Amino acid sequence: MNIIEKIIASHSGKESVKPGDIVDISIDARVARDFGGPNVVKNLEENGLGIDNTSKTFFTFDTNPTGSDQKYAVNQQIVRLYARKHGIKVFDIDNGIGTHTLIDKGLAWPGSTAVTTDSHANILGAIGAFGQGMGDRDVAVAFHKGKVWFKVPHSVKITLSGKVAENVAAKDIILNLLHQFGANSLLGYSVEFYGEAIDKLTLDQRITIASMGTEMGVIILLFPPNKTVMDYCETQTGRKLEKVEADENAVYEKEFTIDASTFIPMVSRPGKPHDTVDINQEKKVRIDSGFIGSCTNGRIEDMRAAANILKGRKVAPGVVLKIVPTTDEIWQQCLNEGIIKTFKDAGVLFSNAGCAGCAAGQVGQNGPGEVTISTGNRNFAGKQGKGSVYLASPASVAASAIAGYITSEDDIPDSPAVFDDVLRAEELMVAAKEHLDKETTKTEVQGRVWFIKEDDIDTDMIFHNRYLQITDPAEMGQYIFDNLKAYEDFAKKAKPGDLVVTGKNFGAGSSRQQAVDGFKTLGIQAIIAESFGAIYERNAINAAFPILTYDSFDAIDLEDGDELKVNFESGEATNISKNKSMTINPFSEVQLEIYQNGGLF
């Protein structure tokens, strides 16, 4: 077996497992955040469910660690009260990002399992652990049973040969990999990394790469832990750990060998993390703001990299640079090493630990027409505000903030760019104006088709993060697709009984349940896509919301507005408008069982 199979087998009481097997996995760490946590509590209380093991159950407040939004403050207090009642540990607003807490507090270790309401829980692949972001239903079940159902994924082996250039950061490595594999060519796979270049990566570098597995569409990016990582985890857990390694004859569905010496500094262009190009192609694009932080690049090595470039320099006039570490311990390291002083002398806004610009609060978002260069993991339209976002390494972001335009650390000008403030204001006003203008168990359904021919429609396009505080499903439908270009009025035009047909990787991104429940509120009968984001797929199945996959609808000439009939059990699909039939992929046994049960509960 390979690593993912060994971990799943050891946590499901099986001697061995293979791809496609569906098993119940015991979970070592069951976690809910301030985003998702209130719904987990709601699910537990409404279904009369207790807690399996409080010593393995945690809440983490990281998406809005200032409580600056009233609804977040209310939700955090709901969770605190529940936690006090049941004796559950809360890592509160003074702590930092929950997935990093699992690693740094020894709550996750090589070979362990964890689920959270954070879609980037697969960051635990950095230490050779199984981490999964899941929706509030799944996590509520994990709190109650200590287990969740899971389908063993197929695996891919990637070997990096050659030596990584000194000016290529860990962020550049994952951007280069995104350039090669895109957002869905490895959709649903578990990926293992090997090679000399991998062995030499530090824990912080592994975390950066692993944290963007969600953006690649994979289940997880797994790193076999080296001695340094094993030593760190043994120190944090306080016990001797057994290293989990793939067998010599482990089976992988695909294998790739990539020359890491060809990797270059890159940026992701606004809108899609996988739209990556050589940073030189985007040089001199002027910026209004920069952000260094998030679960991808808020470790101490990232802070030091930024400080080395900012020391003795100033952020360009008119540019705002925000820096946020991932944990309070790293904040303290920055204080002890004089890094905070370096940042403040350079004109940086330095905040307490948390998700920061990647989430809905803490250090604010960008406005219409604003151009931001960020170390975050996502730059979907609307994710960090109404402006546009480039993704890059901490060094590139720091260098760009000094220059006033996108540049690399080896090409920082002596004097920053100065732009025409009047012209800039007019552009922003134009951009702002453009922004302002702008439950059943039947197994066969029939309805009008919305054929949305787009791939990688993410959860921010489906249900924007500015609505995350909404917990009442009745209020969710009105916001569906209001951040998807050309479909902003979908909720007003959609009718109960409609079907949505779309492309690959539908529901990529966040673990938010609202992106499923909002369709149910509108009366949408099913979503049919070429493929789904892994977390979205689970959320829909567990909520008894019908989703199906297809290879092509060419055989029945399906078009927007056609009347389509679909049978969930047989997969038979009939275009009533054209009297043509074909077969698509039907429900799996588990999906059908949960659907007929009315949901996971």
Image: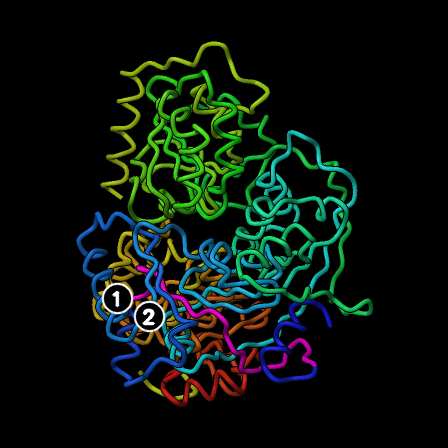
* Vertical side of 42 occupied by 400: above or below: above
Q: Which residues are magenta?
A: 16-38
Q: Residue at x 32, y 62 (%)?
A: 90
Q: Position of residue 322 (x, y in %)?
A: 36, 33
Q: Position of residue 45 (x, y in %)?
A: 26, 80
Q: Which residue position is annotated with label 1?
A: 79
For the question of whether residue 539 can be seen, the reply is: no
Check the image and name the residue furthest to the top: 414
User: Magenta includes 33?
Assistant: yes
Q: Label 1: how many residues lie within 10 Å, few (<14), some (14-19) or many (20+)?
A: many
Out of 101 and 17, give the one closest to the viewer.
101
Is 186 left, or right, of 470 in this rendering? right
Image quadrant in which the C terminus is located: bottom left
Is 127 left, or right, of 68 in this rendering? right
Q: Which residue position is annotated with label 2?
A: 88
Q: Position of residue 167 (x, y in %)?
A: 64, 29
* Vertical side of 269 occupied by 404: above or below: above
Out of 407 and 460, give the one closest to the viewer.
407
Helix, strand or loop for disc 2: loop
Check the image and name the residue furthest to the right: 249
- Residue 528 numbered tag: none
Q: Residue at x 46, y 43 (%)?
A: 376
Disc 1 residue type? Val
Helix, strand or loop for disc 1: helix
Rendering quarter of residue 290: top left
Disc 2 residue type? Ile
Rendering quarter of residue 440: bottom left
* Vertical side of 206 occupied by 473: above or below: below
